[in-house]
Amino acid sequence: GLGIYIGQRDGKTLVVSPIEDTPADRAGLKPKDQIMKIGDEVILGWSQNEVVNALRGEPGTRVVIWIRREEEEDLLKFEIERENIRIQTVKSELLEDKVGLVRITQFNQRTLFDFRKAVYDLLGEGAGSFLIDLRNNPGGLLSSCVDIADLLLDGGVIVSTRGRFDRANEVIYARQGTITDLPVAVLINEGSASASEILAGALKDHGRAVILGKQSFGKGSVQTLFNLSNSSGIFVTIAKYYTPAGTVIDKVGLSPDIEVEGEFERDRDKDVQLKRALTELLGRENETEADGS
């Protein structure tokens, strides 16, 4: 594959996020890029499944994608070689000033285990605060995101769904107890979607973390598949996700507490958002130490 998550909004097929260190990421695709053509085919009117199938292919084969990007006048052409995609969803390390960095690239069955291990390892190394990086995280498994929120929240609502049918209305709560009481900051951007918005929203609304970066993607709907008589099916939105404070996520996104311009950078020296988060965490650590003295 290419290592890309897509979504549809208002009849447009958009890049939600490229997955870190995949062909799509290395080629330079960005969140909210609009896919216009695949090869010679204009994709206007295509379903999301049709677009996904056109992008898929054997490793080593190539595909040409034409993109419309907001700040660019002309369409952008990307020729990308497909690869086998292997994803490590959690990466962690201890940064300067004892900040434990935990980057989550998406949520799957292993993410909870890997996140918990990363936090314990960083605590063992002397971490005094945590920075959770959810930038360009397109989401994934809801239960994984909810379980991670549960580790960080001492009770209270994590997320709720509201819809037209009774079965679509649900409230998910955190249990008592947390994995750590140390200060937490979270980084989000326009590539943070779905489950990553739910996690960031829960931590924000409970005052458990300060959220920095840029407005998130806004992908927060619950869909179900309705089968049609001709053996096809259609996905219909039956509910939307809401943060604990009642903020709707879908098509709106999550606003950071502190807006910081910039993009995710592999070179930390160039990562303005990460530097700002580290400064914020250091200030909060000092406040915590002063309160405790």
Image: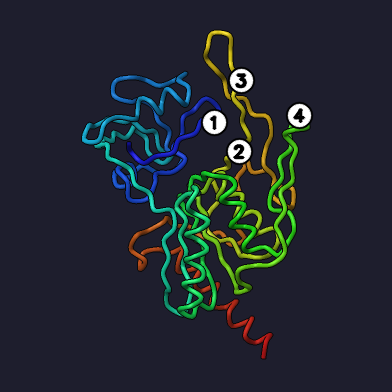
Q: CA distance from mark 2 to mark 4?
A: 21 Å
Q: Position of residue 191 (x, y in %)?
A: 48, 47
Query: Could you tell which of marks 1 and 3 lies nearer the N-terminus?
Result: 1
Query: Could you tell which of marks 2 and 4 lies nearer the N-terminus?
Result: 4
Viewer-proximal residue among 201 and 213: 201
Q: Which residue is mark 4?
A: 165
Q: Which residue is mark 1?
A: 9
Residue type (three-letter) at the residue carrying disc 1: Arg
Q: CA distance from mark 4 to mark 3?
A: 15 Å
User: Do the numbered discs 4 and 3 sit on residues whose CB atoms are within 8 Å?
Assistant: no
Q: Secondary structure at mark 4?
A: loop
Q: Position of residue 172 (x, y in %)?
A: 71, 49
Q: Secondary structure at mark 3?
A: strand
User: Do the numbered discs 2 and 1 sit on residues whose CB atoms are within 8 Å?
Assistant: yes
Q: Position of residue 107 (x, y in %)?
A: 50, 49
Q: Which residue is mark 3?
A: 226
Q: Which residue is mark 2?
A: 251
User: Which of the 4 image quadrants contains residue 264?
Assistant: bottom left
Could you tell me which residue is drawn at 60 percent across and 68 percent down?
A: 179
